[in-house]
Image (cartoon, grey):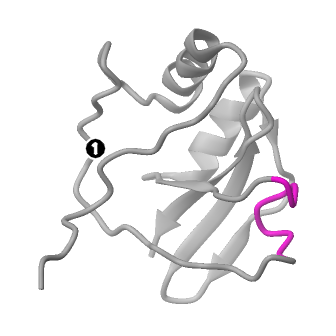
Amino acid sequence: MERVLGIGGYFLRAADPAALSAWYRDCLGLDADEHGMWRQSAGPTVFATFEPETDYFGSRAQRTMLNFRVRDLDAMLAQLRAGGADVADETQDMEGVGRFGWVTDPEGNRIELWQPA
């Protein structure tokens, strides 16, 4: 059986695609080229499904959620707050998995930030 090799892309609709791309670059340091190609660091990727009633993604209208691995969650959240981003007050620790925090991008998409254990 053939199998997928990994995530090949994640695509977002945006009212202002250039501005949203700039936010991801300037606030999260996502250095994609002019075609959107981003060479990410090696590490785990989680694929999980959730019940339709979940509030985990923020708005129930949001059907998917990006999760980015980070080296230092506290430093990333502080950087985002200093830049005026909409950062959730709470964080979550999950034994053996890591720490989680959340930010909402300018288009209203909730993003999870994960510092693996």
* Placement of 51 over or under 27, stated as above or below: below
Q: Nearer the viewer, residue 70 or 74?
A: 70
Position of the C terminus by quadrant: bottom left
Q: Is residue 116 above or below residue 83?
A: below
Is residue 91 rendered magenta in the image?
A: no
Hey, what amino acid is under mark 1? Gln
Q: Main secondary structure of the magenta part?
A: loop
Horizontal side of 15 relative to 67 (left or right) equals right
Query: Please, is residue 45 above or below residue 29 in the view?
Result: below
- Lateral position of residue 20 relative to residue 21, left or right: right
Q: Which residue is mark 1?
A: 40
Residue positioned 72% across, 33% down in the render: 105
Range of the magenta residues?
Answer: 54-61
Q: Position of residue 16 (x, y in %)?
A: 67, 13
Residue 92, position as x, y percentages in the image: 72, 72
* Quarter of the rendering containing residue 67: bottom right
